[in-house]
Image (spheres, helix red, strand yellow):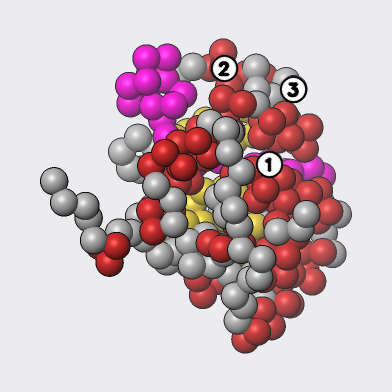
Amino acid sequence: MSKTPLSCTTGLRQFLNVEQQRNWIEGRTNLPDADERLESMELRFKYVGRFQKLLARPQAQEVLKILRLYGQNCIPMPRKTERQYWSVSCLPSTSDKPIVRVNASWMELFAIYVDGESIRARFIVHLSDFITDHSPAQDQVDEFLLEHCVTTPKDVSYFFPRGEDIFGINVRGSASIHKFLAAPYVLRAIRRFNLTHMNRGRNAYQASHCYSVADHILEG
């Protein structure tokens, strides 16, 4: 059987073979990233005002800290893939009013919201990764697993977005968000979902990429 021509390969398959992607999901390898970022100065200046509004919020530094953790652990080769395969929006003008939102292809991956004086994070993952028998059965969600990945069970809730094998998880409070992102099973599930959508092709939200927020995601 002949190999698929490179020109027909979509998404991160252009850079990473199946084994490399699997090893990254399992945390068995650190992927080589680009030294330099490709940047649009026009786009950087376009969202400076929104970024300044974000910095004025009392939750700003915690939001940026969590985004940095997410970027370092959940996005493959974040410098090489910035904007073309993932992007971050700052105070996007959508009805649910997140502070920031990370997207890939046509899909939301992660978002942070104001929750009183604190924050709430929304993770989008594969439903089958949080079902006891790995089937896409909505009535078989492993609630025990979810509750043990946060500091207090009341900090986690879930919902079912439209789409096949799609699962939404809400996590309230900074401490629970940090614990959730540190849970090995959760991290593998997030990585698997992110790769699924980064492999679908170019990011549809490139025009809303906020470089000022991305600076913090790519720190370190």
Q: Amino acid at mark 3?
A: Thr
Q: Quadrant of residue 129?
A: top left
User: Is any part of residue 177 visible from this angle?
Assistant: yes
Circle 2 crowding by C-alpha within 10 Å: few under 14, some 14–19, many from 20 = some
Q: Quadrant of the C terminus?
A: bottom right
Say whether disc 2 or disc 1 marks the residue closer to the N-terminus. Answer: 1
Q: Nearer the viewer, mark 1 or mark 3?
A: 3
Left or right: residue 105 versus residue 86 is left
Q: Amino acid at mark 2?
A: Leu
User: Is any part of residue 157 visible from this angle?
Assistant: no
The answer to if 68 sits in the magenta stretch is no
What residue did someone put label 1 on?
Answer: 120
Spatial CA distance of label 2 from label 1 is: 19 Å
Q: Amino acid at mark 1?
A: Arg
Q: Identify the magenta region.
A: 113-138
Q: Position of residue 28 (x, y in %)?
A: 57, 33
Q: Residue at x 65, y 84 (%)?
A: 41
Q: Helix, strand, or loop for circle 2? A: helix
Say whether disc 1 or disc 3 marks the residue closer to the N-terminus. Answer: 1
Q: Is residue 69 above or below residue 167?
A: below
What residue did someone put label 2 on?
Answer: 145
Q: Position of residue 126 (x, y in %)?
A: 42, 34
Residue 46 vs residue 76, the one in the foreground: 76
Q: Nearer the viewer, mark 2 or mark 1?
A: 2
What residue did someone put label 3 on?
Answer: 151
